[in-house]
Amino acid sequence: MRTPQHRTAPRASAAHEPTALERPTPTRPRADVPARRHGLRPWRSLDYLGRDLVALRRPRDRNTRRRMLPLTVDGFLLIHVPKTAGTSVSAAFYGPDVFIGHTTARQARRAIGPWAYARLLSFGFVRDPVSRVSSTFRYLRAGGAQNRYDLKWQAALAPYPTLERLVADERMLTELNRNQLHFQPQHRFLCDPAGRLLVREVGRFEHLADDVARIAALAGVDVALPTLNTSSADEDEVRLDRAAVARVRELYARDRALFGYD
């Protein structure tokens, strides 16, 4: 098996910029670029696929395309659902220095183009909603990644010393479910609004090592799974009674139904 090529964004060069007459005409795929698994060619040749060129009028789409295309060089693409071990999975497939963010499958497909996206081995990981809410609560209470966004939500969660107190506040829990990135339902990252899955493979946090190995075999690469971005658990802090568990399950009922956590 081959090792995934860990890529970073291309750097600007001070070399001579070719004129319009010196640039090749993008009429067809380059013959010197070898084919990849799953029918995808490297990202530098995607612009030669006429059916894939989409009118990206919004700057956000163009920025997403620029960031996502290097991740498709080996014919696979991870959709990183927050708090499902995505940081470790990303490091295994792309290397520890590559930041992939939390782009949804819908955003990725629109930015890359439906034709090329359909030929990728796209995949994501999911987690039991109750376990994921517990992990998210610990993560944000500790300040998350210490960026402005996570620190803002750390302050918002300050009045809730335990997860049970948070779950008891139905208004706040609903607000987090709708507007906080890490608390948002997993189907918003992996499915379309009708609930149709937009990735080829779904792994489970509960079977992380086995599912990473299975997806790596499908991608034809060798990976080593590190353990990154974990939050320490305090069982007394996150223990929920049956009523609290029922409230979390009800709020994330669609995740449970779509990903088999009923």
Image: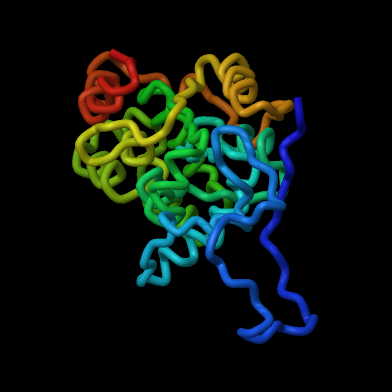
Q: Position of residue 65 (x, y in %)?
A: 49, 59
Foreground residue among 185 and 217 = 217
Q: Position of residue 177 (x, y in %)?
A: 29, 41
Q: Compared to 134, does 64 lie above or below?
A: below
Q: Residue, x 61% and y 28% (percent of image)?
A: 219
Q: Residue, x 68% and y 29% (percent of image)?
A: 227
Q: Compared to 255, does 39 lie above or below?
A: below
Total numbered labels placed on residues in the image: 0
- Quadrant showing the N terminus: top right
Foreground residue among 226 and 169 = 226
- Quadrant showing the C terminus: top left
User: Is residue 109 found left or right of 243 in the rendered image?
Assistant: right
User: Is residue 95 found left or right of 176 in the rendered image?
Assistant: right
Q: Residue, x 40% and y 43% (percent of image)?
A: 105
Q: Position of residue 257 (x, y in %)?
A: 25, 20
Q: Is residue 158 visible?
A: no
Q: Is residue 24 visible?
A: yes
Q: Residue, x 56% and y 31% (percent of image)?
A: 85
User: Is residue 165 found left or right of 234 in the rendered image?
Assistant: left
Q: Position of residue 242 (x, y in %)?
A: 27, 14
User: Is residue 189 found left or right of 47 in the rendered image?
Assistant: left
Q: Compared to 92, does 56 lie above or below?
A: below
Query: Most extreme residue toward the right, as rendered?
Result: 15
Q: Compared to 55, does 106 lie above or below?
A: above
Q: Please say which color scheme the image uses.
A: rainbow
